[in-house]
Image: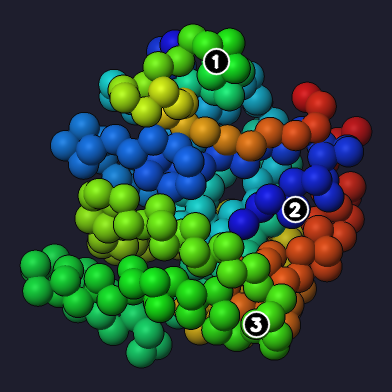
């Protein structure tokens, strides 16, 4: 689970990526899923 | 909404399509823990970009996503290579129309009675109509779209969150005004491909004014969710636009 740094102030809300989820590092509440889910395709 | 556009672009670009909190399959923080405003959702997307290490990007914005993306664009104008705009507050004052009467009353006083009146926009029938209205052939719209939307809306508390966001539209005026100024000075970085038969954001409200002739404007013969039945057309336009604005 990763806290958010940088300039964006989003309080205690945390973003967990699909990568975090795939690695099994995410357990958001009782839902067992990322707080922010997104689709990603293509190369960086 | 973007499920069919993503693969059209992904062979050439890294495509990120986030679900905002309380949308899609993202979690639903309670209203007491999370402020459901366009400004706050913009901060969440900013944080996502930070986390992913993305410092230059093009945006595709639609509906609620317009005022959210505009805030990012205005905060980091040098990071945005281009913006594709579809069926969202842009140039006109679409809220003058009768479809916005309930919201106008709600924005005026925020009263429980006026808040309740806006709930009519969240019924399964209203959600379906948002997909169908203005389309030439409704059979081309996948019924999964409104069925899933309605199921997600039916989760406990999500209706109240949507009413919060609908109320917050009143706070987007300055952002939209500032965005228009940005569009004027960055015309070649803007493409509008929009369903012109959308009763919420009709074509006349999306058409660039005469003093912005270099903005690409593509009227699509569709409704609010134009990507649902015109994805190949909008996808091709988006690829062409990105090829022009994204540095290689």
Q: Is residue B60 above or below residue B202?
A: above
In the rendered image, the vertical position of residue B156 relative to residue A11, given as above or below: below
- Estimate the x, y position of residue B28 in percent, counting from the top left: 33, 39
Q: Which element type, helix, strand or loop, lies under badge 3?
A: helix
Report crowding for label 1: few under 14, some 14 to 19, many 20 or more residues within 10 A (C-alpha).
some
Q: Is residue B4 left or right of residue B172?
A: right
- The answer to whether mark 1 and mark 2 are in CB contact below 8 A is no
Give the residue pinned by disc 1: A20
Tell us which disc is closer to us: 1 or 2: 1
The chain containing the residue under callout 3 comes to: B
In-front residue for pair B27/B169: B27
Secondary element at tag 1 = helix
Q: Between residues B206 and A38, which one lies in front from this camera angle? A: A38
Toward which corner of the image does residue B208 lie, by quadrant?
A: bottom right
Q: Would you name the residue on which mark 3 appears?
A: B138
Residue B204 can be seen in this image: no
> For this view, does B98 lie left or right of residue B83?
left
Counting from the top left corner in percent of width and height, residue B192 is at 69, 66
Where does the image place residue B216, in percent across and percent down from the top left? Answer: 77, 67
Cβ atoms under marks 1 and 3 closer than 8 Å: no
Answer left or right for A41 relative to B247.
left
Q: Is residue B134 visible?
A: yes
Residue at 43% in and 47% down: B23
Same chain for mark 3 and mark 2? The answer is yes
Secondary element under disc 2, as helix, strand or loop, is: helix
- Chain for numbered disc 1: A
Q: Pointer 2 indicates a residue of which chain?
A: B
The residue that disc 2 covers is: B5
Q: Around disc 2, counting alpha carbons within 10 Å, would you say few (fewer than 14), some (14 to 19), or many (20 or more)?
A: some
First along the sequence among labels 3 and 2:
2
């Amino acid at each position: 689970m990763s806290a958010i740094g940088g300039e964006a102030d989003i309080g205690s809300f945390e973003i967990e990526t699909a990568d975090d989820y795939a690695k099994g590092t995410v357990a958001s509440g009782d839902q067992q899923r990322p707080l922010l889910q997104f689709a990603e395709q293509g190369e960086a | 909404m973007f499920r069919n556009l993503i693969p059209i672009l992904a062979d050439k670009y890294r495509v990120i399509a986030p679900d905002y909190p309380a949308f899609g399959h993202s979690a639903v923080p309670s209203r007491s823990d999370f402020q459901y405003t366009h400004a706050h959702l913009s901060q969440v997307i900013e944080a996502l970009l930070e986390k992913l290490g993305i410092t230059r990007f093009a945006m595709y914005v639609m509906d609620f996503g317009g005022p959210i993306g505009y805030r990012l664009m205005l905060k980091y104008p040098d990071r945005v290579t281009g913006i594709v705009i579809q069926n969202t507050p842009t140039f006109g004052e679409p809220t003058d129309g009768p479809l916005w009467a309930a919201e106008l009353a709600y924005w005026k006083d925020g009263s429980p009675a006026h808040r309740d009146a806006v709930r009519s926009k969240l019924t399964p029938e209203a959600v379906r109509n948002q997909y169908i209205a203005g389309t030439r052939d409704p059979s081309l719209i996948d019924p999964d779209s409104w069925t899933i939307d309605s199921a997600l809306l039916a989760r406990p508390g999500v209706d109240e969150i949507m009413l919060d966001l609908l109320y917050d539209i009143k706070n987007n005026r300055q952002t939209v005004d500032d965005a228009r100024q940005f569009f004027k000075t960055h015309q070649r970085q803007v493409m509008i491909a929009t369903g012109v038969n959308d009763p919420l954001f009709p074509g006349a409200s999306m058409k660039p004014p005469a003093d912005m002739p270099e903005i690409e404007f593509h009227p699509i013969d569709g409704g609010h969710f134009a990507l649902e039945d015109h994805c190949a057309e909008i996808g091709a336009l988006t690829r062409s636009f990105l090829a022009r604005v994204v540095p290689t």
